[in-house]
Amino acid sequence: MPIDISPFCLPDETAIIITECQNAVLGANSPLKGLVACVEQNGMLENIARLLEQARPKNIPVFHCTVERREDGFGDPLNTPLTLMMAKHGGASAGMATGSEGARIVDALKPAATDILMPRLYGMTSFHETGLDHFLRNSGIKNVIICGVSLNIAVIGATIEAVNRGYRVLVPADCVEADSAEYKAAILKNSLRSLAFVTDSQTIISHWC
């Protein structure tokens, strides 16, 4: 029997978290070609943009969680195959130096004045040493809608960390992507459905109209 998600997306108790939708990850020069292709083929950015258009008039907070690095790469441990690959491609800062084009959010999701920018300098997920939890908790948020990339790491990592902190998580399947399509289907079916309420953007929007 389908679960009624209406209590889990009440505007006064809900925030949207958008993970790593920035040029170094999804732009033309990104080394993550498989991920970029999936995003383009499935219209993820357009779907997120429509969700935000409906959320902002309801005063639902929008958090853009991005990755940044020092320009000289100082302090980046390069302790995973992914971070090593990104550094090889983009130099010491992995193409994500603070204030750089790679750190900038993609044009399709240009932040509004009311959006909150939440960059991180370390770690693999949006809750790691960013203050995101404090902002959510101090503003009365109980539910988070997680969008963006990728299901391979950041989205599932943020979901687990949100659940660990007591939040309910909604994942609109048309607002997240992975490399590859087969992996996306598998992780939604076998992992995220046990952690989050997997739905779609239009269903969420219908509860705000």
Image: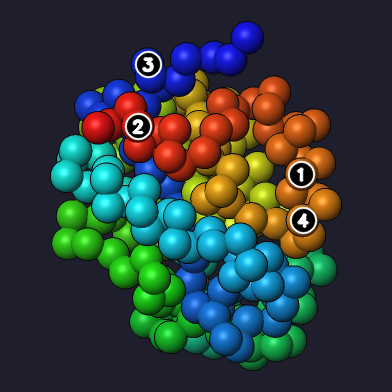
Amino acid at the residue labelled 3: Pro
Determine which residue is flagged by label 4: 181
Classify mark 1: residues with Cα within 10 Å, few (<14), some (14-19) or many (20+): few
Q: Are marks 3 and 2 in contact (CB under 8 Å)?
A: no
Label 4 neighbour load within 10 Å: few <14, some 14-19, many 20+: some
Tell me which amino acid carries mark 4.
Ala
Label 1 or label 2, whichever lies nearer to me, is 2
Compared with 73, 77 (above or below) is above
Comes first in the chain, label 1 or label 3: 3
Q: Residues within 10 Å of mark 3 (few under 14, many from 20)?
A: few
Q: Secondary structure at mark 3?
A: helix
Measure the C-alpha gap from mark 1 to mark 2. Answer: 24 Å
Q: Is the C-beta separation of discs 1 and 2 under 8 Å?
A: no
Q: Earlier in the sequence, mark 4 or mark 3?
A: 3
Residue denoted by label 2: 206
Q: Quadrant of the C terminus?
A: top left
Left or right? Give the position of 62 relative to 79. left
Spatial separation of the CA atoms under disc 1 and disc 3? 26 Å
> Label 2 sits on what residue type?
Ser
Left or right, residue 148 beside residue 46: right
x, y percentage for residue 144?
43, 34
For residue 88, say whether it is visible.
Answer: yes
Secondary element under disc 4, as helix, strand or loop, is helix
Q: Which residue is mark 3?
A: 7
Q: Residues within 10 Å of mark 2 (few under 14, many from 20)?
A: few
Q: Name the one closer to the observer, 184 or 87.
A: 184
